[in-house]
Image (cartoon, rainbow, N blue to C red):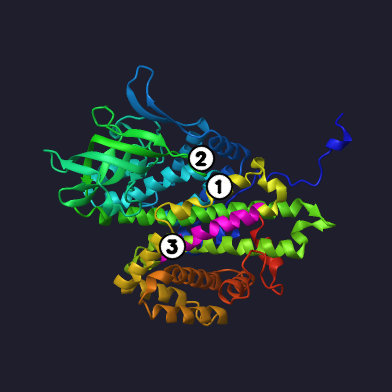
């Protein structure tokens, strides 16, 4: 019989055995809003199935094991032969295989594919964010490959396949393939035009030999990679297969795996090219233009990934507060805790609503929507990913000391939270990209203003924020030093306009009062007390 001192009470049960999709009202409503009604029943069934899988005890265990057992590099076999392989825990392969089979790399050709995939990405990466990297790279490689119809015809069916094949063999022998990307080098970082990797043409048209290094190469276990190198005609994009058609390994030397703050289950590497065979993608000298659509797609995935992490952090905080009692009642019912939880819920819903709106724009594909994406994607990537870490920190604190313990899962979310802000261009890169869109593509600003203008007149605080933004946009001289401030306002106004149009009044009112109206402090939990915060929290509670 257990000693009475060991009786455990007043602890929240694990948040497990639930439908991650159905429990996320903001996500469900975004799918209902943007998807063709004829596709809704099928999509809901598909996403709920993935939501139940994600919320299951088994998949949550896979996520924990993949995080606790990071990949290991094997440069040589037992005989001293160079093999450059990465070994993963079986849970990683289970996670990645499920992500592929759920269609998270197959958005480009099916109706409503981007919206459905985006919703699935938000759901699935709540189990473990690391496997989102190869899923994202593979998905995003498709538009770059489409600049070369022959390459696209060869590779796109493999990349959009729902079959996960982890074996290293020629891609032509596989039912499905994954892609990675290598752009940054030690001396240049985000300034990819400073790359020094050399591409020397071979006799066969479009083929080259690469010599150089990549300081960051994502997903090194993939079947192919899009990389940038200096060809005779300038910086160009290349496809580097991991295994050549005759079955031999391409010269792809993995020097080490990065020892990262978070994202531990996923392999990020440094690689050397020394006589590495490659095929050119697009024209010589147009490497950045060729790969830019891949970069845009991965930037949207950064926003989706941060929305996913925020949702999981907020769900855990509200779940804990629902069951934990202190000072004579549930934490959930305490006015101050309710203020904190409502504030976190607003940030999460605004992130999800914005990211899903951008995914819907990809499906639309019209000229106006493409112009809108040119401005909105880097703005969303900048702001949503920046908000992720403070949300994770505050959500962890809601669990008190329990949240600081690894078993709670909150430290894993916290370590993951800065990643999407850093990858695919950090904050300054995104802010400068927004400035380039404003200065060079007037259609992008027009499309943005039409979008936010749809909510004009619905809330005076939003109207005031739009007016102030227009004043800032009227003077672009010396704008670089205040670019972050401007991009923040662009993102907040866009989020506010979407919530005013689509969210319940309680959510829109609280967002506009705090983020746009200035009635807010510098920490979470400083919303005006007169708002209907209980409704905001209840909406975000993970009950399916």
Q: Residue at x 64, y 59 (%)?
A: 540
Element under label 3? helix
Seen at 43% across and 82% down, the residue is 471
Q: Position of residue 38 (x, y in %)?
A: 46, 59
The residue at which mark 2 appears reads as 264
Query: Residue 368 vs residue 129: left or right?
Result: left
Quadrant of the image occupied by residue 61: top right
Tally the marks: 3
The CA span between labels 1 and 2 is 9 Å
Marks 3/2: CA–CA distance: 28 Å
Q: Tag 2 or tag 1, which sits nearer the N-term?
A: 2
Element marked by disc 1: helix
Q: Is residue 388 within the magenta segment?
A: yes
Q: Are marks 1 and 3 in contact (CB under 8 Å)?
A: no
**Quadrant of res 274:** top left
Q: Nearer the viewer, residue 185 or 343?
A: 185
Task: Tell me which numbered mark, 1 or 3, is placed earlier along the sequence.
Answer: 3
Magenta stretch?
376-396
The mark closer to the camera, 3 or 2, is: 2
- Left or right position of 196 against 110: left
- What x and y, as percent, mark residue 164? 42, 36
Kindly tell me whether residue 409 is visible in this rendering.
yes
Q: Of callouts 3 and 2, which one flags the residue occurring earlier in the amino acid sequence?
A: 2
The magenta stretch spans residue 307: no
Residue occupying the point 24% across, 31% down = 245
Q: Main secondary structure of the magenta part?
A: helix
Q: Quadrant of residue 518?
A: bottom right
Q: Check if mark 1's residue and mark 2's residue have beta carbons within 8 Å.
A: yes
Numbered label attached to residue 415 = 1
- Residue at the spot of label 3: 358
- Of residue 90 and residue 252, the one placed in the foreground of this image is 252
């Amino acid at each position: 019989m257990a000693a009475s001192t060991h009786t455990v009470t007043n602890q929240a049960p694990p948040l497990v055995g639930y439908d991650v999709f159905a429990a996320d009202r903001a996500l469900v409503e975004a799918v209902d809003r943007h998807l063709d009604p004829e596709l809704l029943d099928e999509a809901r069934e598909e996403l709920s199935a993935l939501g139940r899988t994600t919320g299951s005890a088994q998949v949550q265990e896979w996520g924990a094991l993949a995080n606790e057992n990071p990949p290991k590099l094997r440069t040589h076999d037992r005989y001293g032969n160079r093999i450059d392989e990465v070994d993963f825990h079986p849970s990683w392969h289970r996670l990645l295989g499920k992500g592929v089979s759920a269609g998270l790399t197959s958005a480009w050709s099916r109706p409503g594919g981007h919206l459905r995939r985006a919703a699935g990405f938000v759901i699935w990466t709540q189990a473990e964010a690391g496997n989102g990297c190869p899923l994202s790279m593979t998905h995003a490689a498709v538009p770059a490959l489409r600049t070369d119809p022959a390459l696209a015809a060869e590779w796109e069916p493999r990349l959009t396949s729902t079959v996960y094949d982890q074996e290293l063999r020629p891609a032509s022998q596989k039912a499905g393939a994954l892609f990675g990307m290598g752009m940054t080098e030690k001396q240049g970082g985000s300034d990819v035009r400073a790359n020094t990797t050399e591409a020397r043409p071979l006799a066969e048209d479009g083929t080259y030999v690469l010599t150089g290094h990549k300081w960051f190469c994502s997903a090194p276990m993939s079947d192919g990679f899009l990389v940038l190198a200096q060809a005779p005609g300038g910086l160009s994009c290349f496809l580097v297969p991991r295994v050549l058609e005759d079955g031999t390994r391409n010269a792809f030397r993995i020097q080490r795996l990065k020892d990262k703050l978070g994202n531990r289950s996923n392999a990020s590497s440094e690689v050397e090219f020394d006589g590495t065979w490659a095929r050119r993608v697009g024209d010589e000298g147009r490497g950045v233009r060729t790969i830019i659509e891949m970069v845009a797609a991965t930037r949207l995935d950064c926003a989706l990934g941060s929305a996913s992490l925020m949702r999981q952090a907020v769900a855990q905080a509200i779940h804990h507060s629902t069951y934990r009692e202190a000072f004579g009642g549930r934490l959930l019912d305490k006015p101050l805790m309710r203020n904190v939880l409502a504030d976190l819920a607003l940030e999460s819903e605004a992130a999800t609503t914005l990211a899903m709106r951008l995914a819907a724009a990809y499906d639309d594909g019209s000229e106006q929507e493409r112009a809108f994406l040119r401005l909105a994607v880097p703005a969303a990537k900048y702001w949503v990913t920046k908000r992720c870490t403070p949300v994770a920190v505050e959500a962890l604190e809601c669990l008190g000391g329990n949240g600081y313990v690894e078993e709670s899962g909150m430290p894993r979310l916290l370590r993951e939270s800065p990643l999407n802000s850093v990858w695919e261009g950090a904050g300054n890169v995104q802010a400068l990209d927004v400035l380039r869109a404003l200065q060079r593509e007037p259609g992008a600003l027009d499309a943005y203003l039409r979008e936010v203008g749809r909510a004009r007149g619905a809330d005076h605080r939003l109207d005031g924020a739009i007016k102030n933004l227009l004043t800032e946009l009227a003077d672009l001289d010396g704008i670089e030093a205040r670019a972050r401030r401007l991009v923040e306002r662009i993102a907040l106004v866009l989020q506010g306009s979407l919530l005013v149009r689509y969210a319940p009044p309680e959510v829109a009112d609280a967002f506009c009062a705090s983020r746009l109206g200035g009635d807010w402090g510098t920490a979470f939990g400083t919303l005006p007390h007169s708002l209907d915060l209980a409704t905001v929290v209840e909406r975000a509670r993970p009950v399916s």
